[in-house]
Image (tube, grey):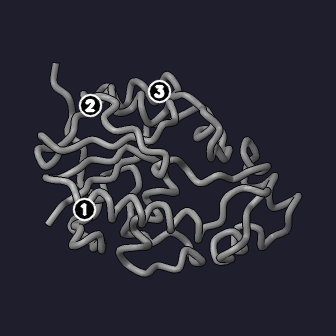
């Protein structure tokens, strides 16, 4: 059985401003670089195969954590939010209605701002998990908020229409076990370690 540790990239300027990034290739902020450079991965990740989103914020995070770019995999990209990218939550609600995020989360075919539906995101993350399960040994995936949420959803059945479950801390590491590509929660909220000088 394969274990895979999912982690989100470090903070960016758009994260601090509450802007949706999606496929827009925003780099880490100075604070994000400092944060990720101060951390290291727990022993569970030692010797694991590495998979990284092609977006620069994920690739930079991988390098800061002592990982090489590994296997760049486009299926680990953030959800494509189309015309919503660069906007804040309030800007989206004022332009597209109070139920904009509800429609984005539950509509199988709804593509926010002409981007990618939640169903499409789940399908590509599920495809990635099935392929990762075929490899030898454990794996680490450096990805994005939407990808972590999709992996959690595939493992738990969360419908994504309700607020994010309080037991999921996306600033930490989500570990899944894959039995034939079927994910289940192995460990929630695994802590990073602090790098010592």
Judge whether 161 appears above or below 128 on screen: below
**Residue highlighted by disc 2:** 67
Residue drawn at (37%, 78%), measured in percent from left and top?
156
Q: How far apart are marks 1 and 2 (CA)?
A: 20 Å
Judge whether 155 appears above or below 194 on screen: below
Is residue 104 toward the left or the right of residue 79 in the image?
A: right
Q: Position of residue 76 (x, y in %)?
A: 45, 49
Q: Which of marks 2 and 3 is nearer the N terminus?
A: 3
Is residue 22 toward the left or the right of residue 127 in the image?
A: right
Per the rendering, the mark at residue 133 is 1
**How many marks do you count on the picture?**
3
Towards the viewer: 101 or 139: 139
* Secondary element at image label 1: helix
Camera-side mark, 2 or 3: 2
**Residue highlighted by disc 3:** 31
Judge whether 79 appears above or below 18 on screen: below
């Amino acid at each position: 059985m394969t274990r895979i540790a999912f982690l989100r990239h470090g903070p960016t300027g758009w994260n601090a401003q509450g802007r949706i990034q999606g496929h827009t290739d925003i780099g880490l902020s100075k604070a994000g670089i400092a944060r990720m450079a101060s951390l290291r991965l727990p022993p569970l990740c030692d010797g694991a195969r590495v998979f990284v989103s092609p977006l620069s914020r994920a690739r930079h995070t991988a390098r800061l954590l002592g990982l090489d770019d590994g296997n760049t995999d486009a299926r680990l990209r953030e959800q494509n939010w189309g015309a919503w990218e660069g906007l804040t939550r309030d800007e989206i609600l004022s332009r597209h209605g109070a139920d904009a995020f509800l429609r984005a989360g539950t509509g199988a075919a709804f593509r926010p701002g002409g981007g990618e539906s939640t169903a499409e995101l789940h399908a590509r993350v599920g495809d990635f998990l099935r392929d990762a399960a075929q490899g030898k040994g454990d794996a680490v995936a450096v990805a994005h908020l939407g990808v972590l949420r999709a992996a959690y959803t595939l493992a738990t059945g969360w419908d994504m229409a309700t607020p994010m479950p309080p037991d999921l801390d996306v600033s930490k590491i989500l570990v899944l076990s894959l039995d034939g590509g079927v994910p289940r929660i192995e460990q929630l909220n695994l802590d990073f370690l602090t790098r010592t000088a």
